[in-house]
Image: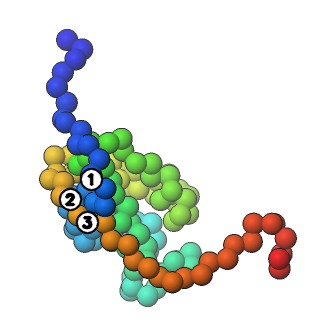
Amino acid sequence: MANKAKPRVPGPPPHGFVQSAGKQEDFFGKAKELAEVLGWGGDPDWEYLDIRVEDAIAYLMQKLHEQFIAGAQHVEIPDWLPVVEHLAVDTEEERTAVVAAMKQAYEAGKGAELTMHEKRVVRTDADLTLNISGKKGK
């Protein structure tokens, strides 16, 4: 018997809304634990590889929450390679820790309740100018 029932995949949210599950803050403990394995232990304002401890924890917390939401939405597990690259993970032990934490967050999301939230746009009034010519000073 090759075919069997699977969880229903929810459709996309209505225009102007996003789907979420859980809270990002729920992943603080796991993010802090993973950050310590990767070298970001200590006081929040300490640095490693020019990244503050609190920023590394916040980044990992966000990425773990994204995995959790993907699990709740029954979509394909997001790629964790950007996490490995962004935090300059260079040992097999560290890579294994990242992969295990991301998979665990994804699996934990399966069966989690999805909630609908109105999309908010935050204006920063930032002006970003990029040099795409490849020439310095132009």
Q: Secondary structure at mark 3?
A: strand
Residue occupied by mark 2? 116
Residue 61: x, y in percent?
A: 34, 67
74 relative to 138, above or below: above
Please tell me which of labels 3 and 1 falls first in the chain: 1
Residue farthest top in this picture: 1
Identity of the amino acid at label 2? Answer: Met
In this rendering, position of residue 92 left or right of residue 77: right
Q: Earlier in the sequence, mark 2 or mark 1?
A: 1
75 or 104, which lies in front? 75
Question: How many angstroms separate mark 2 from mark 1 (CA)?
Answer: 9 Å
Q: Which residue is mark 3?
A: 118
Pinpoint residue 104: horizontal percent, then vertical percent: 28, 51
Q: Amino acid at mark 3?
A: Glu
| As drawn, 130 above or below 73 | below
The residue sitting at 29% across, 47% down in the picture is 12
Amino acid marked by disc 1: Pro
Mark 2: give few (<14), some (14-19) or many (20+) Cα within 10 Å.
few
The residue positioned 25% from the left and 56% from the top of the image is 19
The answer for how far apart the CA atoms under marks 3 and 2 are is 7 Å
- Which SS class for mark 2? strand
**Residue 41 x, y percent position in the rendering:** 40, 77
Which corner quadrant of the image does residue 64 belong to? bottom left
Query: Dividing the image into 4 quarters, which one contains the C terminus?
Result: bottom right
**In the rendered structure, are the residues bearing label 2 and label 1 in contact, judged by CB atoms less than 8 Å apart?**
yes
54, 46: nearer the viewer: 54
Q: Position of residue 58 (x, y in %)?
A: 37, 73
Against 127, is 115 above or below?
above
